Image (spheres, rainbow, N blue to C red):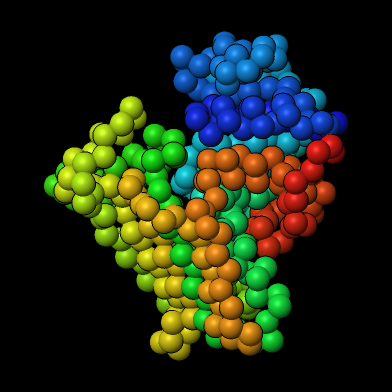
Amino acid sequence: MLNIIQLGLGPIGQQLTRYLVERKGISIVGAVDPDPQKVGNDVGLFAGIEELGIRISPNLESCEATDSADLAVISTVSSLQKMESQIKEAADYDLDVVSTCEELSHPWQTQPELAQSIDNYCKQKEIACVGTGVNPGFLMDYLPSVLTSVCRNVEHIKVERIQNAEPRRKPFRDKIGVGLTESEFKEKEHSIRHVGLKESVYMIADGMNWTLDNVEETLVPVKADKAIQNGKINVSEEQIAGVEQVARGYIDGNEVIVLVFKAAVGIQEPHDTVTISGVPDFKSTIPGGINGDIATSAIIVNAIRTICHASPGLKTMLDIQVPAYFSNI
């Protein structure tokens, strides 16, 4: 039996609660969220399922289950700088860590000093830590890396994640600017984006043992070509429907990796596609794409068994055993 403490009980955290209780061999023994409106609630009832007898605590220090827990599932922030203290606090309680933090997925080139600090602390405390999710963590980095396993030679990798944002949770739609005017988008441009695209480029390069000399990233708004109005979305024509974000990695001035992330309401033909140029050339497409909210929660749960058997330190998805689905620990 693996005993889990959840940190962060937003929409993804609540979905994680539901997914965690489904797995044999996993037990939620603690839950933490500083939001006063959440503290004291039963974590099961708060997630919309049966009562679990676990009350949400405001912090790890006040959580009575730290001595009996094996691992912390952290779904709180996207920023590595903000995540560092949370990882170190979990490590102080001898808890391995699986997190949805996008910047944690592969921070060795984007934030090397923070990455080294986290790695050193985890090794000192003898715990393992990984950041993962559907993206970054799988579709635009781990999956294309795995697909190159059948190649004699690889010259270029292109990944396209084109998704309809209508079924996604509201925080995701807010993150990509759905419903903003053009002027509002410009005001908030620094915070409207998919986090982790550069990390995905570097993860692919790491898997290929490529040393990139440059990574560029661009982002443009996607405007609605017609009004989209239903029970949860109200977007007028010409308002922002989402974003198109592109990251490119170069070696000696030549593009070797390009990642195209486009998420907007109203997308008609969503898909996830990996194109490998090399020997052999091939294209792999998932028609309709993978639902990001389902996949992120699922891969977090599936990574639990793997990270508990990993050596100490900060890991990426390339460092650990395949986090395959399991029905029982």
Name the quarter where the C terminus is drawn.
Answer: top right
Relative to 186, say whether 169 is above or below.
Answer: above
Residue 73 in percent (x, y) is at 65, 36
* Quadrant hosting residue 52: top right
Question: Is residue 316 left or right of 114 when viewed as pictured?
Answer: right
Question: Is residue 250 in view?
Answer: yes
At horizontal 81% and vertical 38% (from top left) the residue drawn is 327
* Quadrant hosting residue 253: bottom left
At horizontal 67% and vertical 12% (from top left) the residue drawn is 51
Relative to 133, say whether 65 is above or below.
Answer: above
Name of the residue lying farthest toward the left? 183
Residue 99 or 174: which is nearer the viewer?
Answer: 174
Residue 95 or 293: which is nearer the viewer?
Answer: 293
Question: Is residue 87 left or right of 109 when viewed as pictured?
Answer: right
Residue 71 in percent (x, y) is at 73, 36
At horizontal 31% and vertical 31% (from top left) the residue drawn is 230
Question: Is residue 6 left or right of 38 when viewed as pictured?
Answer: right
* Quadrant hosting residue 228: top left
Name the quarter where the N terminus is drawn.
Answer: top right
Relative to 169, say whether 252 is above or below.
Answer: below
Question: Is residue 101 in view?
Answer: no
